[in-house]
Image (spheres, grey):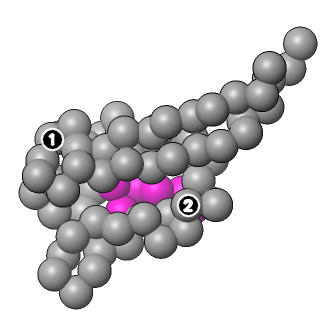
Amino acid sequence: MVTAIHDTRVIVNEDWCKKCGICIAFCPKKVLESDELGRVVVVRPDQCIACTICEKLCPDFAINIEVTKDE
């Protein structure tokens, strides 16, 4: 049985994020950008493919990818 991704949420913990930009640089779908203050913001949530590269590379564990799957 193949399970399809139904919904993906990218959560950035602003208290933990030190604005290094690693997540922005490595996102293959350019889901993340920095705002005028350098904070990471999710600008294209519908483009997220849940690859979790941002989550894995974040040195501060400030990003969490939540995936809901159809059953």
Numbered-mark total: 2
Horizontal and vertical percent position of residue 42: 43, 65
Question: Which residue carries the number 2 mark?
Answer: 45
Nearest to N terminus: mark 2 or mark 1: 2
Residue 22 image point, x, y percent: 27, 56
Q: Crowding near pointer 1: few (<14 within 10 Å), some, many (20+)?
A: some
Residue 4 on the magenta segment: no
Does residue 56 appear anywhere in the picture?
yes
- Give SS at disc 1: loop
Name the side, left or right, on which 35 lies relative to 47: left
Q: Are marks 2 and 1 in contact (CB under 8 Å)?
A: no
Closer to us: mark 2 or mark 1?
A: 2
The picture quadrant where one finds residue 28 is: bottom right
Q: Secondary structure at mark 2?
A: helix
The quadrant of the image that shows the C terminus is top right
Which contiguous range is marked in magenta?
23-29
**Residue depicted at x 29% and y 74%:** 34
* Residue sitting at the far right: 1
Q: Residue 53's quadrant in the figure?
A: top left
Q: Residue furthest bottom?
A: 36
Q: Nearer the viewer, residue 60 or 67?
A: 67
Residue drawn where x is 55% and y is 68% of the image? 44
The circle drawn on residue 15 is: none
Query: What residue did someone put label 1 on?
Result: 60
Q: Quadrant of residue 65?
A: top left
